[in-house]
Image (spheres, rainbow, N blue to C red):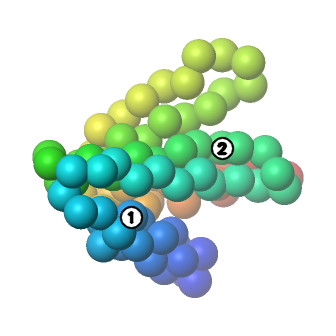
Amino acid sequence: MSQLLGIIQRLKTLQDGTDHSETNQRFFEINGKKICQVTYMPTADTFELEVYKDDKKPNKFPFDDIDMTAIEIFDLLQENHE
């Protein structure tokens, strides 16, 4: 559960660190391997989750809820935890 809270705190930092015109990004990694990237877009108050899968083109998913974004990141980290 503490990992999920850590993810939420990092997402809140993205929201709080903007001046409403600049987008902020944060990577989530496991053992140096990038699993995903989150971009916060303050003008739309949304998160864009970019998921990396091996050598394939990354998939992008929009989220308008911080909790759903955090849960998706948590699930991705659990799937890729070795």
The residue sitting at 43% across, 42% down in the picture is 49
The answer to whether residue 15 is above or below residue 65 is below
- Viewer-proximal residue among 31 and 1: 31
- Outermost bottom residue: 2
Q: Is residue 8 visible?
A: no
What residue is pinned by disc 1?
Answer: 14
Dividing the picture into quarters, in which one does residue 17 lie?
bottom left
Callout 2, which amino acid? Ile
Image location of residue 12, percent across then percent down:
36, 72
Which x, y percent locates residue 24?
Answer: 40, 53
Q: How many residues crowd around disc 2 within 10 Å: few (fewer than 14), some, or many (20 or more)? A: many
- The residue that disc 2 covers is 35
Relative to 81, is 48 above or below? above
Q: Is residue 82 left or right of residue 16?
A: right
Residue at 57% over, 83% down:
2
Give the residue displayed 62% in from the left and 32% down from the top.
52
Nearest to the eye among marks 1 and 2: give it: 1
- Kindly report the distance in space between the C-alpha atoms of the residues bearing marks 1 and 2: 18 Å
